[in-house]
Image (cartoon, coloured by chain):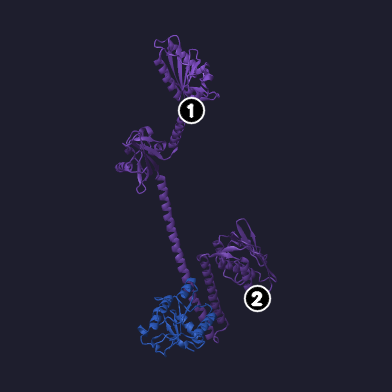
Chain colours: A blue, B purple
Amino acid sequence: MKRILLVEDSANDIELTLMALAEHNLSNEVVVARDGEEALDYLHRRGAFESREKGNPTVVLLDLKMPRVDGLSVLREVRSDPELKLIPIVLLTSSDEESDVAEGYNLGVNAYVVKPVDFHEFVDAIKKVGLFWSVTNVAPPDAGGGSGSPSQLRRSGGINP
Amino acid sequence: MGSDTAPMRPAGNTTGYAILELVAGILGIAEDAVISVDETYRITMFNQGGERVFGYSSQEVLGQPLDLVLPEYFWETHRLHVAEVGESEDGSTNVGERQETYGRRKDRSEFPAEVSISDLDLGEEKIFTVMVRDVTERKRADEALRSSEARFAGILSLAEDAVISVDEAHRITTFNQGAEGIFGYASHEAIGQPLDLLLPERFSEIHSSHIVVFGESGDVSRKIGERREVCGRRKDGSEFPGEASISKFEQGGEKIFTVMLRDISLRKQADNEIRSLNSTLKRHADHLATANRELEAFSYSVSHDLRAPLRHIHGFADLLQKHSATSLDEIGRHYVKTISDSAKQMGRLIDDLLTFSHMSRSDVRTTAVNLSHLAREVIQELEEGTGRQNIVWQLDPLPDVEGDAAMLRLVWVNLLSNAVKYTGTRSEARIEIGSKAHQEEIVFFVRDNGVGFDMQYADKLFGVFQRLHRSDEFEGTGIGLANVQRIIHRHGGRTWGEGVVDGGATFYFTLPRTKGETTK
């Protein structure tokens, strides 16, 4: 079971984020969903993810602005589902628009992190988030499950450490 | 009347005496003064009414000339008149017509009197009997009535509203000047005509039936047209919207209806204009709201979509540098660094632009703000942030104001960090913060001894992304003062700056005075 679900539509951001996590040996823990719909399919174990192993990720790193189902909609659905509602979710996004921050916390997000333009700051921020939620933080009960078969997931091809 | 007050000529028998007694009784209870005089106009009888009216007792006046109580001029005319009558054949009777004159009381005061005189010709001797009635009260009542009528007529003629009375047959009996003005008929043209004259034909039946219904109702007055528009017709046939009320009263068993009608075409027109202006205003407001929404969407999009590629540029430039550390020569590394720096600069510009846009869009949350406290906080942050030791701060006590604390804090951040930045080349920087209260507003200022600026560019100071220095001289995006101006404008104040090249700069802003401000 992968411990981090990264929900991100931008290939560049996926690459940079995995790069940052790789610096701390966390990239092997990552499952990537390319939009909100795919993220919900993964979490609900349906569609392409029907056969994945049971269990919730330790943390979801969730982009806000995505095609089809956006980050806030994913957050809303996760929080209203008894099976999923305890999953720690971090909004990881380009903007600190006041309305987004407010709405995110209203919907029960666990953290709101703005991705800095400066790559060094960006790496630093991702490192802190990754380490805190997957190592320091104690996950809620049932986060676990054995190692899955995430064969159909888009993986961070070729940039593992 | 006692026998002592009115000596009467005794008649020749008892019946005569009885009649005399009767007459004396009647005279005693008469309200009017009854005075008899002989041919020389000397008073021979003065009844109790006379005593009441004139204030004399009968003893005082018996034998006195009548002039004592009635003015001579009146008497003179009578004398002439009597002379004529006396010469007529039928001289035995009266000159009974009532005449108006003045009576004089014992206290010399005069009063309006109505007098009638009868003559009794006894052959050898003539007796005149004068009946005098004090008509002061009646005169006063008449006067009051006349003045009330005049007042009413004055009001009627002054009223801009049409005041029109109709009788039970709906014929016009009153038509004031207001009605003349509104309908275009002279009153003599309207009076006596049916009310239909003033109504569009399609309404006349309805109006008439209303009057009938109202006539039968218990109401004394009623406003018409509260639910329905009243419509009048002018002499030229044109129609106009009106507002009317009706009242009725009964006179001699006949109902009289009075309608007050106001021409409201001007008001209607004004109403329509207001409605049209309102709808224009609403359209503008809608446009503005749409523009605002678009601006928000735009700014939201900038905030997300423009930052992401910059992050990628910066990230991959960094990765390129690491990846090709050995293969890149100095020029190659310079190129990569330039790409990184430019991306970061654009990131700052976007951030600043978003802040500026935020200052314009977000609500001003007004509270009492301690500006001194805010300034001290910002100074401390700047000292820690820059690590500069060579700044002498002079912070005068500042009054409290009402405003958005977060926004006003940004004003200090921008003005004070500017002062710090542009004094960076000085061996000792002096930065002074103060204020001066005026009648309507308080002027705040930040003065520094930095590099200053050329006043001919003063109008560019507060423009968005306008700079008076190259960024290799002083860093910056040129948004700081634009933010200051935007914030101060939103607080109802003004901003301006004064500077001398290499001679320091002073930036001013004003805030409206508030009640209960105190200096801290």
Dot 2 lies on which element? loop
C-alpha distance separating marks 2 and 1: 106 Å
Q: Amino acid at mark 2?
A: Gly
- Element at label 1: helix
Which of the 4 image quarters holds residue B378? Answer: bottom right
**Which of label 2 and label 1 is nearer to you?**
1
Residue B293, relative to residue B90: is it above or below? below
Q: State the residue at coordinates (68%, 74%).
A: B389
Vertically, is B108 above or below B506?
A: above
Q: Chain of mark 2?
A: B
Judging by the rendered image, the residue that carries numbered circle 1 is B136
- The answer to whether A69 is drawn above or below residue B273 in the figure is below
Residue at the farthest top position: B124
Residue where numbered disc 2 is placed: B387
- Determine if residue B419 is in view: yes
**B444 relative position to A80: left or right:** right
- In the picture as drawn, the residue positioned furthest to the right comes out as B427
Q: Quadrant of the C terminus of chain B?
A: bottom right
Residue B236 percent coordinates (x, y)? 35, 38
Answer whether residue A20 is visible to the viewer in this image.
no
* Residue placed most toward the observer, B430 or B190: B190
Q: Position of residue B349 (x, y in %)?
A: 54, 71
Up-down relation of residue B208 to residue B496 (above or below):
above
Residue B358, x across and y down, in percent: 51, 68
Q: Nearer the viewer, residue B293 or B437?
A: B437
Q: Position of residue A92 (x, y in %)?
A: 48, 78
Is A51 situated left or right of B454 in this image?
left
Which one is nearer the viewer's eye here, A110 or A29?
A110
Q: Total number of numbered labels?
A: 2
Q: Amino acid at mark 1?
A: Thr
Badge 2: how crowded within 10 Å, few (<14), some, or many (20+)?
A: few
